Amino acid sequence: MLLGRKSELRHLNNYYDREGSQIVVVYGQKHVGKTTLVREFLKERPGYYYLARACSEREQTYQWGMQMSRDGYEMEAFPGFRDILIGITRQGNGKKVIIIDEFQNIVKVSSEFMKELVSFMHSHWNRDEVMIVLCSSTIGWVENSMVSRIGETAYELSGFLKIREMPFEDIVERFPNFRIEECVEAYAILGGYPGLWNRFDDRLTIQQNICRNILNPDSFLFEEGERLLTDQLRELSVYNTIMASIADGSHKLNNLYLHTDFSRAKISVYLKNLIELELVGKVFSYDTAGKDNVQKGIYRISHPLVDFYYTYMYPYWSELQTLSVGEFYNRYVMPDFRRHVTGYFKHICRQHLARLNDRKRLPIQLDVIGEWVGKDGELDIIAQDAEDHTLIGLCNWERPVTYEDYNNLLDCAKKAKISADYVYMYSAFRFDERLNLETKVRTNLKLIQISDF
């Protein structure tokens, strides 16, 4: 099922409607829904889909040729790339679509592949138009290494389309049987990755899904949190150490140095690789006058499933083998799970604010939405418009929000040296009576419960 992705599909359609032939690169994190998108795009259009293997060039053409033979094409046992492309374009009428998924597996072992694509495209110019879609799950390679690898053929690329995570509102649509709170918890585990959503069942509770579909050694997601690293990285022992350290609370370079005993230079190199793969993120606080009070150089695991794996599974790997799934959940996941979800609830609240902003349902039209991490306190939301009017916010998932929380938020704004024109407070629970009364005298104060989503 293709959920959302209207703008991405429109983007591909625009390329297809152009005159002539194109080569478009579509890339994004594993499980983000690239294959579903391109296969939807291929529907009712003449074309072909091939998933490239990690193998030699000769084995690649053999496998591709065998697949085409099974689909009714006349192919030699070991065709060349040009033979394959010509074979595809000979069938059907109209502009052809050729989708090559995980194309980096070919480029990394073949210096001729991209040259063959370009030569083929030009040799059929204005006769057999073709749109070639090159897909990849290796974000770091596409953004940092691909152009140097393919050389001058990079000039022939018509464009790039990066497929990003789906927003929270789509997981609500995907799981109609979940309560809104359960959707938040599912998003805190699976993120905006539709390929992972397919592993959950909204006829079960979140606890049942965690136990059956993640903690169960026979489930697909049991080791997927680590596979997202091993698929793209070597030296897993180093990466495991760094990821486990971050999950354990070592969020700064010096903390990681003290925990791992690796050199700071080594840690920095490995963090850079993890950031390129979008598995770790470096937190950049909103730029305010309160620079003396801001924390710098903070790292967080940015992929929810990877975060869950290194928080709840990796440290207790022995217990996972000896305890029943239910016992493990009750002992190691349940006591801390609400705190864990809190960080992702903040992300969801910022999405909600951005959606209100897009629909012009805020008192100001925001230009930037971010967060501020201070040495003593945080602003979960800080946003400004073009005239520097400022909106700040608190996002609380763990307990009811009190008037004291409101005062603490204003105190934190003072430490950031900003004046708040508007205050938005999000809660998964209720707000205390004094805070509700405050909204009657302060029109710039807005209280939002999760049910309002």
Image (cartoon, helix red, strand yellow):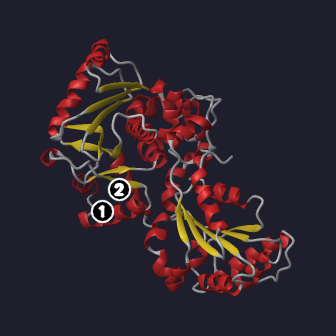
Question: Pointer 2: what residue?
Answer: 242
Question: Pointer 1: what residue?
Answer: 267
> Which of the pair 142/269 is nearer the observer?
142
The outermost residue toward the left is 292
Is 156 situated above or below 398?
A: below
Residue type, numbered disc 2: Ile
Q: Is residue 143 left or right of residue 90?
A: left
> Which of the pair 334/370 is nearer the observer?
370
Circle 1 packing at 10 Å, graded few (<14), some (14-19), many (20+), is: some
Check contact, mark 1 vs mark 2: CB within 8 A. yes
Q: Is residue 340 left or right of residue 421?
A: right
In percent of width and height, residue 151 lies at 49, 84
Q: Is residue 416 left or right of residue 210?
A: left
In percent of width and height, residue 174 lies at 62, 38
Q: Secondary structure at mark 1?
A: helix
Cα separation, mark 1 vs mark 2, equals 8 Å
In percent of width and height, residue 71 lies at 84, 68
Can residue 371 be seen here? yes
Is 430 situated above or below 78?
A: above
